[in-house]
C-alpha cells in the first residue's frame, strides 16, 4: 500500500516495517496518525528509529490510538504510571522479562490493542526482539484443524509469571513487580480470534498465559497446546528487530506474538513500554 506522508520499508516477508518521514516527538495530524494506524494493520509491527521521546511524549503518541492502561503487576514510573520500565542490569543473569513467545496481558478480559516500546539503553549486541504473524499461524493450519480450533475456548491466567510462586518471585529484581493472588484469576478467550479492524482470523494462544482448553484438564490440553505454541513461532512467520538507542516499536497485540531475546549478559538493557487498551476477543 502507498502512503502520502510516511514511507514504509518491510523488514521481512511475514511482517514488520520500518517507518520513516515522521517524528513521534511532534504533534502529528489526524491524517498522519491514520496512515500510521493503517501501516500497523498492514505490517502488524512497525518501527521508528532515531526518536528522542520523553515519557510525556511517548504517552501522547500512544494515546492517539486509544486510552492507555496500567499493568496489573508491574508498577509504572512514579510520575507516569502508564509507563513500565523493562530493565535488566548488567549484573543480572536470570530470565529476562518477556523472554518467551507471548501476547501481552491475555489474562485480562480485554487484552491490550497494542504496545509502544521505546529503547532507553541498549546493549552493544544482542537484545533483539522477535515478532510472529498469527494470521499466518492460523492460515497455514490444515482445514480440519482450523474447523476444530474455531469453536474452542482457552483459559488464560497470569499465575505463571505473577502468581505468589511465579517467575517474578526470583527474576526481574530491578523491576517494580508485585506478585499477588489476583494473578490466579482465570479468563476465557477464543483460541482463534477475529481481528476487529481487518476481519482476519488469528491464532490466539501463547505459552506465557494460556494454560489449558475450557472443560479440558491441563494434562489433556498439553499435547495440542504444545503443538500450537511451536507452530505459532515457525521462522517463516517471524521478523527480528535489532534495537538502537532511541528506537520505538509499535505492535498489534491482536495479531502477533513477540519474544525478547536473552543474549546480552554483562550488558544493560532498558525499555519503556506503554499499552493501549483493547477490546474483548471474539
Image (cartoon, helix red, strand yellow):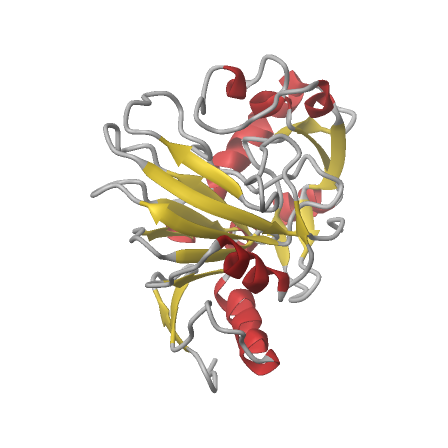
Q: In this rendering, would 265 be left or right of 75?
A: left
Q: In this rendering, would 79 be left or right of 129?
A: right
Nearest the eye: 134 or 268: 268
The answer to which image quadrant residue 248 occupies is bottom left
In the rendered image, the residue lying farthest to the bottom is 4
At which x and y percent is residue 67? Answer: 69, 57
Position above or below: 93 against 146: above
At which x and y percent is residue 116? Answer: 51, 54
Q: Residue at x 65, y 39 (%)?
A: 106
Position above or below: 225 against 258: above
Position above or below: 240 against 35: above
Q: Residue at x 26, y 41 (%)?
A: 123
Q: Residue at x 58, y 44 (%)?
A: 79
At which x and y percent is residue 207? Answer: 54, 31
Q: Residue at x 53, y 76 (%)?
A: 28
The answer to which image quadrant residue 261 occupies is top left
Nearest the eye: 99 or 164: 164
Q: In this rendering, would 225 be left or right of 122?
A: right
Nearest the eye: 30 or 279: 30
In the rendered image, the residue lying farthest to the top is 165
Amino acid at each position: 500500500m502507498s502512503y502520502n506522508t510516511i514511507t514504509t520499508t518491510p523488514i521481512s516477508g511475514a511482517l514488520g516495517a520500518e517507518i520513516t518521514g515522521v517524528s513521534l516527538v511532534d504533534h502529528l495530524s489526524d491524517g498522519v496518525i491514520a496512515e500510521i494506524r493503517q501501516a500497523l494493520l498492514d505490517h502488524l509491527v512497525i518501527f521508528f528509529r532515531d526518536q528522542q521521546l520523553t515519557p510525556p511524549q511517548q504517552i501522547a503518541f500512544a494515546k492517539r490510538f486509544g486510552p492507555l492502561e496500567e499493568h496489573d503487576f508491574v508498577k509504572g514510573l512514579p510520575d507516569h504510571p502508564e509507563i513500565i520500565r523493562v530493565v535488566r542490569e548488567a549484573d543480572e543473569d536470570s530470565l529476562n522479562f518477556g523472554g518467551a513467545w507471548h501476547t501481552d496481558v491475555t489474562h485480562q478480559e480485554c487484552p491490550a490493542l497494542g504496545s509502544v516500546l521505546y529503547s532507553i539503553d541498549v546493549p552493544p549486541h544482542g537484545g533483539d526482539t522477535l515478532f510472529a504473524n498469527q494470521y499466518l499461524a492460523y492460515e497455514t493450519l490444515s482445514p480440519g484443524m482450523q474447523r476444530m480450533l474455531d469453536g474452542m475456548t482457552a483459559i488464560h491466567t497470569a499465575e505463571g509469571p505473577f502468581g505468589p510462586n511465579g517467575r517474578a518471585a526470583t527474576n526481574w529484581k530491578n523491576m517494580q513487580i508485585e506478585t499477588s493472588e489476583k494473578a490466579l484469576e482465570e479468563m476465557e478467550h477464543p483460541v482463534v480470534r477475529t481481528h476487529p479492524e481487518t476481519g482476519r482470523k488469528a491464532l490466539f494462544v501463547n505459552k506465557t498465559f494460556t494454560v489449558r482448553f475450557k472443560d479440558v484438564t491441563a494434562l489433556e490440553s498439553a499435547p495440542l497446546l504444545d503443538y500450537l505454541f511451536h507452530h505459532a513461532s515457525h521462522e517463516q512467520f517471524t521478523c527480528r528487530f535489532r534495537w538502537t538507542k532511541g528506537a520505538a516499536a509499535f505492535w498489534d497485540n491482536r495479531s502477533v506474538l513477540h519474544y525478547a531475546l536473552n543474549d546480552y549478559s554483562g550488558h544493560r538493557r532498558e525499555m519503556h513500554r506503554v499499552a493501549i487498551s483493547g477490546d474483548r476477543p471474539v
